[in-house]
């Protein structure tokens, strides 16, 4: 062996030793950087490599093998796998998984470029062309996942998949997918497929699509809204909530939906939304329905045309701290929610529509505020509509005009004298919904203006008593007045277009204090009993303005005998009229609060626990010094408490100190006639509670809560029944009215309402809402006394969900069964079945 041969063998041996396993074991991590520079082939970036096991270099084939949590970084591209092969001849990187001791593939490759990443079983990446061929890819795109048997990735990150499928299921073997032989994925833009079909648990279905298109962008995009189908007893089969969604720009969108029935009914539902960050947001809904029940020629054939408008707007406080604007408009036909058989329970049970549009401005550096309000109130049962267009208010915050006078170092009695000012102006009308837009109706608006100036002061008397006194000045302005005349046969009432003003004032003085009583006990569970009593005595004086010198009241002949009556020229005024008769009321009330302190031997931190027995018990009444009869007013009793710190109870009742006969009240006291202080007149009691699975469990510290959460995560689906999450709301009301005279019948109403939900397992939920009308005498059958009832069943099907909504009784008796994909991107992929029965007995 010559000298040159010996040198070559020694050099080869050293190279082999440098890259063998024994060297790799000397260091747990191997990090290296390879730079491949040649005149023929220059790479754009350096290659950073890393592995945990070993690196082997094949000099003859120009390959490097990396084993054990290997990774390659090339620019913003990172490939990780259990095995990576760098091929310098082809300028490629091959990443694959390896088999463990039992033959299972582990360490499958993951490709990451920027924020995008995907998993596969094999990745072949070309360093020069930046193209990539992938086998059995799994990549997440938005809310969905892409699976492909073979994938080609181009330099612009576009993926071409062969034998691919799209799904929103995150399982390795998805429960469902839309499968196609060819799929094109454009990141952050769209996913397009050729002919596709739906599969469940890898089983093909006959649901076929000529092509598939899935938006793959964070931005909103326009598209078709797939309708649901079902059957209505009176309107036939239907397609419901189908239409189109328009993404107009970054700030607005528009949804157009419609319903169509086989018996001729149809409706449209349009929703326009807008939002500008730090400025405002809102939505406008315009709904119209043409409802046809039964068929032409039948007695119950009816065509009902309804509409409904809903507008909400909210200004962001950051837009202008001095000016605010908001709107909440709900207006439409009184029968809209009744005729719409699939309206929600909140709308269906409500018998009033209310609307408010508010604008307000605060004048910086001054005590003044200006506001304008447009309001609407509509009763769906009486069809009465009240409109206020507009209601303008100018107010001044409380000021102390005399505080700066006198010696600033000492406190004077007049320092506490404060005053406010407010101006209100209204333009209002009351009519029915059918006459609302008639010209004659719109000419009957009632307008007026009112000014108020309250002046008050308060100070302490004998340290424990607070004395308050105030005088209120008010004035009304109207643009017309009433004039009545006797024409010989009847009284004629005219309305004159004439500016009219009426002023009045009243005086109020009051004194109140608080009396505390405490009894302490050295032994026993109760440590102390506490009673707080709040007596209040006040006097209100209202002068009368019926004298002719004021000009507010006039007399008119009312019959041929010459009898006269007094009327106010402002009797139709929106803010009323100055008081006719003088009154001076002595008002008195007595409030009570009862509580105890309980010893808790188990609690080492806080020995005493405060418990309120009665949160409020109040008696009140008044006496009119200037009334010619019935000087005493009704006696009011109000009570509020909470039993066991769970059940809220509220009670109120009214008592009359005077007796009654068949004609009504008489000026005789119950005390003298029937030996009782007062006669019971009416009462109202409400009771309710909200309890759940945590209501009766003791409070846990943070460590115990964390341990319980960990146990909950490790539990199987079937759990201990007593640890099932649940919630129950119960409300009871009872109203009793004894009538106004001996011939009046006593009326009583009792209602029980309850709702709740229970999470039976991790996958099953049950919800319910119902009530019972104990006083309903129109229905003899007990089951018809149930009020609006609904039952909801929910089942979590991993990537799908099942919902069942059932209304078993009443006018809206119906059910809706829905099985749908959870993800929003495929929310129209659903099976929905609806049916209603409009029972004649509820019409």
Image (cartoon, helix red, strand yellow):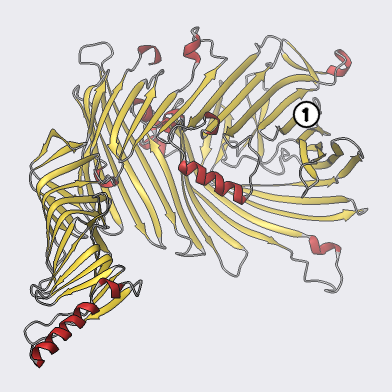
Q: Is residue 150 visible?
A: yes
- Residue 632 at x, y percent in the picture: 81, 28
Q: Residue 638: image x %, image y %?
A: 74, 31
Drawn side of residue 85 relative to residue 815, left or right: left
- Report helix, strand or loop for mark 1: loop
In the rendered image, the vertical position of residue 829 relative to residue 721, given as above or below: below
Along the line of sight, the residue nearer the viewer: 493 or 305: 305
The extreme bottom residue here reads 3
> Is 338 in front, or is 664?
338
Q: Position of residue 798 (x, y in %)?
A: 33, 39
Residue at the spot 42% in from the left edge and 43% down from the top edge: 329
**Vertical arrangement, residue 483 with respect to residue 246, above or below:** above
Q: Is residue 333 left or right of residue 109?
A: right
Instruction: Tell me if residue 115 comes above or below residue 645 in the rendering.
Output: below
Which residue position holds label 1? 633
Residue, x 14% and y 55% (percent of image)?
A: 135
Q: Is residue 531 left or right of residue 5?
A: right
Most distant residue in the front direction: 1
* Residue 723: image location, x then y, percent: 54, 34
Q: Residue furthest left?
A: 40
In the foreground, 684 or 172:
172
């Amino acid at each position: 062996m010559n000298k040159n041969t010996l040198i070559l063998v020694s050099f080869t041996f050293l190279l082999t030793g440098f890259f063998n396993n024994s060297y790799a074991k000397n260091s747990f991590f191997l990090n290296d950087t390879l730079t491949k520079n040649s005149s023929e082939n220059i790479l754009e970036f350096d290659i950073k490599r890393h592995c945990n096991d070993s690196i082997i270099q094949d000099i003859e084939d120009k390959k490097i093998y990396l084993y054990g949590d290997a990774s390659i970084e090339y620019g913003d591209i990172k490939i990780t796998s259990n095995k990576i092969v760098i091929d310098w001849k082809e300028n490629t990187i091959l990443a694959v998984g390896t088999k463990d001791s039992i033959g299972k593939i582990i360490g499958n490759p993951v490709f990451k470029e920027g924020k995008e990443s995907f998993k596969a079983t094999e990745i072949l990446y070309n360093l020069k062309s930046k193209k990539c061929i992938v086998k059995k890819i799994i990549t997440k795109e938005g809310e969905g996942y892409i699976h492909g048997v073979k994938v080609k990735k181009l330099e612009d990150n576009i993926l071409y998949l062969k034998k691919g499928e799209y799904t929103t299921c995150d399982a390795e073997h998805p429960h469902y997918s839309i499968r196609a032989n060819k799929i094109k994925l454009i990141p952050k833009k769209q996913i397009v497929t050729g002919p596709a079909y739906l599969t469940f648990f890898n089983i093909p279905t006959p649901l076929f699509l000529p092509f598939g298109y899935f938006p793959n962008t964070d931005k909103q995009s326009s598209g078709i809204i797939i309708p649901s189908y079902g059957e209505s007893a009176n309107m036939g089969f239907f397609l419901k909530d189908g239409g189109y969604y328009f993404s107009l720009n970054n700030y607005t969108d528009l949804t157009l939906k419609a319903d169509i029935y086989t018996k001729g009914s149809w409706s449209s539902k349009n929703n326009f939304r807008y939002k500008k960050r730090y400025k405002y947001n809102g939505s406008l809904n315009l709904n119209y329905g043409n409802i046809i029940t039964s068929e032409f020629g039948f007695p119950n054939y009816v065509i009902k045309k309804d509409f409904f408008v809903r507008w909400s707007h909210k200004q962001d406080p950051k837009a202008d701290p001095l000016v605010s604007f908001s709107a909440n408009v709900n207006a439409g036909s009184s029968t809209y929610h009744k005729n719409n058989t699939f309206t929600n329970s909140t709308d269906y049970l409500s018998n009033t529509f209310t609307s408010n549009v508010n604008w307000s401005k605060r004048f910086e550096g001054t005590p003044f505020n200006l506001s304008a309000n447009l309001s609407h109130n509509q009763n769906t049962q009486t069809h009465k509509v009240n409109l206020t267009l507009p209601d303008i208010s100018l107010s001044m915050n409380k000021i102390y005009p005399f505080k700066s006078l006198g010696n600033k170092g000492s406190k004077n009695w007049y320092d506490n004298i404060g005053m406010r000012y407010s101006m209100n102006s209204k333009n209002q009308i009351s009519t029915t919904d059918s006459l609302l837009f008639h010209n004659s109706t719109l000419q009957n608006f009632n307008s007026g203006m009112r000014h108020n100036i309250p002046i008050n002061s308060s100070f302490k008397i004998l340290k424990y008593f607070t004395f308050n006194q105030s005088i209120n000045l008010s004035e009304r302005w109207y643009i017309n007045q009433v004039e009545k005349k006797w024409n010989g046969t009847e009284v004629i009432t005219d309305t004159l277009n004439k500016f009219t003003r009426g002023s009045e004032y009243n005086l109020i003085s009051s004194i109140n204090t608080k009396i505390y009583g405490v009894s302490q006990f050295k032994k026993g569970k109760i440590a102390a009993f506490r009673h707080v009593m709040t007596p209040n005595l006040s006097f209100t004086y209202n002068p009368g303005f019926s004298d002719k010198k004021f000009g507010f009241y006039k007399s008119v002949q009312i019959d041929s005998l010459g009898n006269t009556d007094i009327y106010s020229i402002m009797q139709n005024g929106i803010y009323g009229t100055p008081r006719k008769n003088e009154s001076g009321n002595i008002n008195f009330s007595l409030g009570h609060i009862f509580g105890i302190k309980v010893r808790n031997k188990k609690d080492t931190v806080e020995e005493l626990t405060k418990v309120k027995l009665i949160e409020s018990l109040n008696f009140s009444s008044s006496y009119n010094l200037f009334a010619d009869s019935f000087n005493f007013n009704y006696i009011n009793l109000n009570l509020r408490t909470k039993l066991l710190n769970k059940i809220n109870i509220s009670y109120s009742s009214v008592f009359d100190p005077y007796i009654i006969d068949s004609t009504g009240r008489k000026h005789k006291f119950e005390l003298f006639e029937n030996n009782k202080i007062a006669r019971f007149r009416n009462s109202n009691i409400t009771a309710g509670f909200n309890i759940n699975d945590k209501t009766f469990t003791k409070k846990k510290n943070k460590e115990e809560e964390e341990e319980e959460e960990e146990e909950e995560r490790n539990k199987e689906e079937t759990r201990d029944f007593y640890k099932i999450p649940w919630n129950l709301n119960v409300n009871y009301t009872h109203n009793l009215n004894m009538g106004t005279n001996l011939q009046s019948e006593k009326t009583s109403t009792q209602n029980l309402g309850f709702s709740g939900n229970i999470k039976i397992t991790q996958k099953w939920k049950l919800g319910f809402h119902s009530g019972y009308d104990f006083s309903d005498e129109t229905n003899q059958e007990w089951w018809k006394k149930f009020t609006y009832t609904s039952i909801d069943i929910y089942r979590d099907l991993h990537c799908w969900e099942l919902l069942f909504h059932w209304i078993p009784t009443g006018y809206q008796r119906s059910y809706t069964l829905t099985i749908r994909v959870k993800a929003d991107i495929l929310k129209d992929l659903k099976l929905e079945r609806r049916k209603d029965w409009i029972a004649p007995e509820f019409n």
